[in-house]
Amino acid sequence: MRTVEIRALSEEELAKQLEAAYQQLQDLRFRLATKQLVNHREIPRVKRHIARLKTIIRERELSISDAGKA
């Protein structure tokens, strides 16, 4: 999912996406530990996706708090 698409999501959808990404990361780590993971590049890809989601959530938090100060 691209950053533009992520920014278009509502806060509830962002929270669901973040929860799903954490679940996917947990699943990938479990499969890695049990030697069932075929594509090892999936783990960094999911971590980057989580970072993107958290960054956009934080940007929205800061813009809400900055709007109240102005």
Image (tube, rainbow, N blue to C red):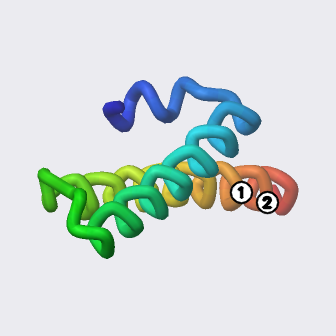
Q: Quadrant of residue 20?
A: top right
Residue situated in front as seen by the camera: 41 or 63:
41
Residue at 67% x, 60% y: name it: 62
Tell me if residue 19 comes above or below residue 14 in the rendering: below
The quadrant the C terminus occupies is: bottom right
The foreground one among 50 and 35 is 35
Residue at x 53% of width, y 50% of height? 56
Q: Are marks 2 and 1 in contact (CB under 8 Å)?
A: yes
- Amino acid type shown at disc 1: Glu
Where's residue 25, x and y in %?
Answer: 43, 59
Q: Quadrant of the N terminus?
A: top left
Q: Is residue 9 above or below residue 58?
A: above
Give amino acid for label 2. Answer: Ser
> Could you classify mark 2 by the number of other residues whose Cα lies within 10 Å: few (under 14), some (14-19), or many (20 or more)?
few
Q: Which residue is mark 1?
A: 61
Question: Dot 1 lies on which element?
Answer: helix
Task: Check disc 2 and report its element: helix, strand or loop.
Answer: helix
Disc 2 to disc 1, C-alpha distance: 6 Å
Q: Which residue is mark 2?
A: 65
* Residue 46 % position (x, y): 34, 54
